[in-house]
């Protein structure tokens, strides 16, 4: 993965998200980047991210899918406008999150999230994400992300 992830280009006033904010020292600090036409993020759950001993808490899975989806939306929309991330990444927020749990997700191995852009409009991006553990799909999600409302991050 490259040195700088999508989330590294968020403006400081919108970099506090528990799931992906680089300025939230207590959060997950998820990092997403391009891998061809897909996006990828990796996260290794801690022992306290448990639901039932040996398995990952479903809320963590939803949080990772959510943040990878909004990061993917921001990068895709920025790229579609012909900009590079260094010039300022657009910021998207979640309008809808749907998660299907396909099988129990084991606690211990690194999780890999892979995203694809299903729909890209000026103010809305739909992203499909699959979460894998040890090469097996454990969850699928759809994130409908919308351009962050003006002034939301100011203050």
Image (cartoon, helix red, strand yellow):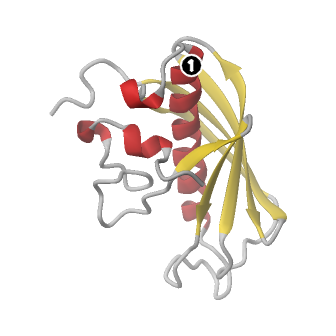
Residue at 49%, 53% (x, y): give it: 3
Tell me, yes or no, if residue 88 can be seen here. Answer: no
The front one of 14 and 7 is: 7
Badge 1 density bin: few <14, some 14–19, many ≥20, Cα 10 Å: many
Residue annotated with mark 1 = 124
| Horizontal relation, residue 138 to residue 142: left or right | right
The quarter of the displayed image where residue 72 is located: top right
Residue 35 falls in image quadrant: top right
Residue at left offset 36%, top offset 51%: 21
Please state the horizontal and vertical placement of residue 108, each as a whole percent of the image: 65, 82
Quadrant where the N terminus lies?
Answer: bottom right
Q: Nearer the viewer, residue 42 or 26?
A: 42
**Vertical relation: 79 (above or below) 141:** above
Q: Residue at x 23, y 38 (%)?
A: 13
Image position, residue 67 (x, y; %) = 51, 46
Rendered residue at 59%/16% (across/down): 80
Element marked by disc 1? strand
């Amino acid at each position: 993965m490259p040195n700088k992830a999508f989330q590294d280009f968020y403006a400081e006033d919108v970099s506090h998200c528990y799931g992906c904010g680089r300025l939230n020292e207590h959060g997950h600090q998820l990092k997403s980047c391009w891998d061809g036409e897909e996006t990828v993020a990796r996260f290794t759950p801690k022992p306290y991210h448990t639901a039932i001993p040996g398995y990952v808490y479903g809320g963590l899975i939803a949080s990772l899918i959510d943040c990878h989806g909004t990061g993917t939306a921001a990068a895709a929309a920025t790229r579609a406008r012909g900009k590079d991330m260094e010039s300022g990444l657009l910021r998207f927020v979640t309008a809808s999150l749907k998660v299907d749990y396909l099988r129990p997700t084991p606690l211990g191995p690194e999780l890999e999230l892979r995203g694809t852009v299903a729909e890209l409009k000026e103010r809305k991006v739909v992203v499909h994400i699959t979460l894998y553990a040890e090469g097996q799909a454990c969850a699928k999600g759809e994130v409908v992300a919308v351009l962050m409302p003006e002034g939301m991050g100011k203050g």
